[in-house]
Image: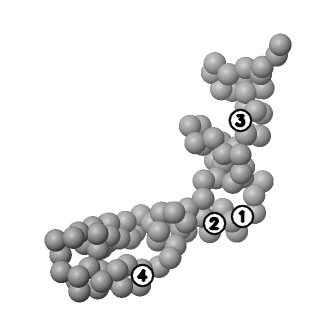
Amino acid sequence: MAKKSQINRNAKREKLVAQYAARRAALKAKADDMSVAPEDRFAARLKLAELPRNSSKTRIHHRCELSGRSKGYYRKVKLSRIALRDLANFGQIPGMTKASW
């Protein structure tokens, strides 16, 4: 089980990303638009830099839904490799069995 502080920090980041998503997208579009005057694009970059760092989507870390583990994460099932194997061994995931040969 991951530390509660790490899980809570990631949840806080997810909330900030959702809160600033529209504002961040508008500023990025204005900063990348070559038809806008260079001064306006530079001002958009400065406003983008003033937004909280944790409002950036790249700062969110994928975490297992069950354990909160950040490493060995399978995006398709949103679980870590350890939690996925435990569930598969107990037959909790349809169609998944332990390999044997």
Sequence-wise, the earlier of marks 3 and 4 is 4
In the drawing, what numbered circle is on residue 4? 1
Please tell me whether mark 1 sits on a helix, a strand or a loop.
helix
Tell me where residue 18 appears, x and y as whole percent: 41, 64
Amino acid carrying label 3: it is Leu
Residue 58 horizontal side relative to residue 84, left or right: left
Q: Residue at x 69, y 54 (%)?
A: 70
Please tell me whether mark 2 sits on a helix, a strand or a loop.
helix
Characterize the local packing of mark 1: few (<14), some (14-19) or many (20 or more) Cα atoms within 10 angstroms: few
Residue 93 horizontal side relative to residue 45, left or right: right
Please tell me whether mark 3 sits on a helix, a strand or a loop.
helix
Amino acid carrying label 1: it is Lys
Q: Which residue is mark 2?
A: 8
- Closer to the camera: disc 1 or disc 4? 4
- Closer to the camera: disc 2 or disc 4? 4
Q: Which residue is mark 4?
A: 49
In the drawing, what numbered circle is on residue 84? 3
| Residue 26 lies in quadrant | bottom left
Amino acid carrying label 2: it is Asn
Disc 3, disc 2: CB below 8 Å? Answer: no
Marks 3 and 1, how far apart at CA: 21 Å
Sequence-wise, the earlier of marks 1 and 4 is 1
Residue 23 horizontal side relative to residue 1, left or right: left
Marks 3 and 2, how far apart at CA: 22 Å
In the drawing, what numbered circle is on residue 40? none
